Amino acid sequence: MTDSWWELGEVSGFDGNRLDVWRLECVFCGEKGNFGLAQHFDKKKANSSKSLNFDLYQCRNCMGFLHVLWSANEFGSGIYDFRVLPWPTGKPAPSENWPPEVQRFWVQAKDSLKNENWDAAAMMSRSALQAAMRHKSATGSNLKAEIEDLATTGVLHPLMKDWSTEVRELANDSAHPKPNAPPTEPQDARDIMKFLDFLLLYLYDLPKDISNYRQRRRPTQALTP
Ligand SMILES: [Zn+2]
């Protein structure tokens, strides 16, 4: 979160002008989008159309409650953002800006890391990277070469290329474990996961934030002759 709760929904978020209930997932029973609104309050910003909505939703499956704070963009640019209490524990949630197969491998990489399955974590991280490289039409005979290719064409920041030479697991290009291969070191598994997180942020989330920003600018610019 940024400096003020009034900033919620102003810079980044989801498409739309109001909370999509289908996005809510019950943290108690895992049911998605099956909620009834139990209570609603809002607080309006002075001299502005901006309001913060305080919604209490009840899960129709287990009768548990979620407190959702959400707000739509003040300038009507079609984005909103929300926070939920209590937040989900356990399964990490991927960004929906990523391609589906990237999301799938990323979840498995995170799970493996949490459960200290280092080989699996490294392998799933490589698979997620590979899927992202394919999605961005990178060329090269291996993962490292593809990352270099994207840096050369300006799709990736040169720093990512410099960083990629430091990540030991990127040099390991096997999709399957080799017999007699040494086990993956915990730090190497964490390193490639961190590299993956930054790469996805740069390739997918940052451009989405910038496009949201442009949408936010456009309505106000249209008013000035
Ligand atoms: Zn529930």
Image: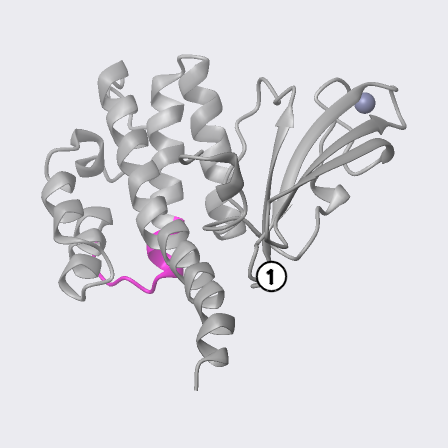
Quick check: 51 above or below 186?
below
How many callouts does the rendering have? 1
Residue 176 shows up from this direction: no
Left or right: residue 42 versus residue 94 is right
Residue range corresponding to the magenta coloring: 131-141
Residue 18, image x, y percentages: 70, 51
Q: Residue at x 33, y 55 (%)?
A: 133
Q: Nearer the viewer, residue 187 or 65?
A: 65
- The type of residue carrying mark 1 is Gly
Residue 195 shows up from this direction: yes
Ligand 1 image-quadrant field: top right
In the picture, which quadrant includes the N terminus?
top left
90 inside magenta stretch: no
Left or right: residue 71 versus residue 118 is right
Q: Residue at x 49, y 53 (%)?
A: 99
Q: Residue at x 70, y 46 (%)?
A: 19
Q: Residue at x 50, y 48 (%)?
A: 101
Left or right: residue 48 versus residue 64 is left
Q: Nearer the viewer, residue 195 or 16?
A: 16
Q: Which residue is mark 1?
A: 78
